[in-house]
Image (cartoon, rainbow, N blue to C red):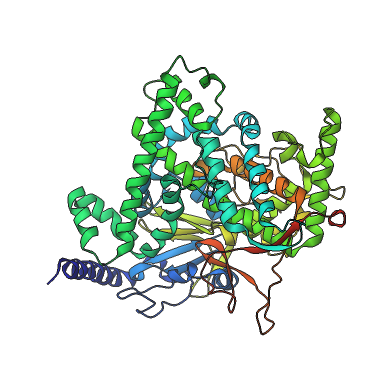
Amino acid sequence: MSMQAIAGLLLVAILLWNLVSRRLSLDRSPLSTVSGPRKEHWLTGMPCFLWNFHRLFKDGLNYSFDLFAKYGGVTKVYGVLGAEQLLVSDPRALYHILLKDQDIYHESDMFVMTNKLLFGEGLISTLGEQHRKQRKMLNPVFSLANMRSLLPTIQPIADTLFEHLRGELPEDGSTKEVDILPWMARGTLEYVGRAVLGISLDMLDTMKSNKHADAIRAVAHTGLKVFFLRPLVPMAMRNLSRYWRNKLVDWLPFPALRELREISYVLDSSARKVFLERKAAMQDEVDSDIGSRRDLMTIMLKANVSMSAHDRLSEEELVGQINTFLLGGQETTTSALARILYVLACEPYAQARLRTEIRKAKEQYASEHDYEEDWERVHLPYDALVNIPFLDAVVRETLRVHPPTNMINRTCTKDAILPLQFPVRSTTGEEVTAIHVPAGTNIIMSILGANHEKRVWGEDASEWRPERWLNANGERIGFGKNLDLAFGEESAGQDVDGSPGYRNGVKYPGVYATMMTFLGGGRACIGFKFAEMEIKQIISSLLCQLHFSLPSAMDADGVRKEIYWRMDGLQVPVVRPPHSDLKTMQCPLDIRLVQSSDFC
């Protein structure tokens, strides 16, 4: 018998043992009265699995909305091997999970250990005091002051991105279909490379390749191929040496595992190379350029040196942040940019209105500073850019209705009571206002469900309506107030009454405009302000000179090409048959140069 067969049988035996032990405990589970869909058949695509949780990850948009409508803010779903889990979107429950009781609800072992294997000791791979120490040092790195100083240094990326798209068009500037997704991916990765690491990854030079960038782009999609194996990672990490873990990867009949291992080697060696280069530059007193560097890696290293010995991060932790930042700043921002351009292609009036407001802001800034160049080439500083009212509304509304990441997991580490804002009905028909959550329960926080909750956002919660963020004069509601929370603050202390997402004293604890897209609390997305700045800069730069519309191509039978957004963990654009396979990620839009009629 081959080693692959032996390893496969061992894996099956482990899964069967877990299945039997879980089945024996189901009848006495405190979650037995929590309502939810019935378990599905064993063979939902994989042997020895009994679950419906997988449907949330397999084009699960409609399935998710069906669950929210039928069961409310807390739903019981069945995960791998029939494990009972809770799908949560209730605002009070999320407040407890993310803020009040965040020491009880931790990132899952499989999440932390998988990230540690792939990315090292970064923010997404640490818990407890180690994570708090890292956040304490890194929060100031992403301050508004640093965002303001970064913006001029990365503006050329947006300009180059425009030039590449312009180069795809006919010389007369007429319409041509262009897949914007790879260009958005290249642009976002180059932004993170230059702004965070202070290096160019050559992403906007199609004649060059970069192993580090290629590994970052491949890791998520390669990981999804073996997603079902993630629950076994903690056991392997705790019980097997590195030698035997590598042997297991060699023996198991999953090529994607071996691909992931090679990716992890590239990520580690590349991150160490970047770290050593930055460290050497800081220690080189002769380097006259170091004083003017404004990349976040340099700022982070300087901040770390200034910390006390107790608070200072180790070299392993600093290396771990590099790939964490690259990964965190790439796929979700790519998805958000493509979605905004797609939505604007669907909404021609909104596109024209936004383009007009951007022109107005640039003309005003040029006039105030005696600039004589064409308005399209005016580069707005940070505060002028982020405060364009309709641009802000379009970005917020798109990130609310179409969050790039739809759910995040937590594990309940001890028995707890989870209070609810909105009562749900149990399997006995009783209306309950709290759920007893046993230790070890996996919690799936539904960002999508929270952002579409009608009792908080209104009956039109699922409509894309950017005007909800503006008053009758077209100004931002609550302008001048702190609508975006500081890290670690409890949202109850913020005055946002009257703003969207705050109804009858109820709102979500999100760090960004009370929505849950960037989460909240001590593990909120540390780079949300950077992502917002990047998105607004790219959109404002492209929209000045390019017009976007839905693809007009038709096949021989007159069927028009149609983009469809799949929800497979991330929301990704694909094209429906007969023009494509409904699997290949792409976002083809018709693009042409802007004309005078494209303004309001």
Q: Position of residue 525 (x, y in %)?
A: 53, 44
The answer to whether 468 appears left or right of 24 in the picture is: right
Q: Residue at x 20, y 52 (%)?
A: 239
Q: Residue furthest bottom?
A: 557
| 512 vs 3: above or below | above
| 519 vs 487: above or below | below
Q: Residue at x 67, y 80 (%)?
A: 559
Q: Position of residue 108 (x, y in %)?
A: 38, 53
Residue 495, quarter of picture = top right
Q: Residue furthest top?
A: 286
Q: Position of residue 453 (x, y in %)?
A: 64, 61
- Residue nearer the viewer, 510 or 243: 243
Residue 102 visible from this viewpoint: yes
- Which quadrant of the rendered structure holds the C terminus? bottom right
The answer to whether 49 appears left or right of 517 in the picture is: left
- Residue nearer the viewer, 569 or 268: 268
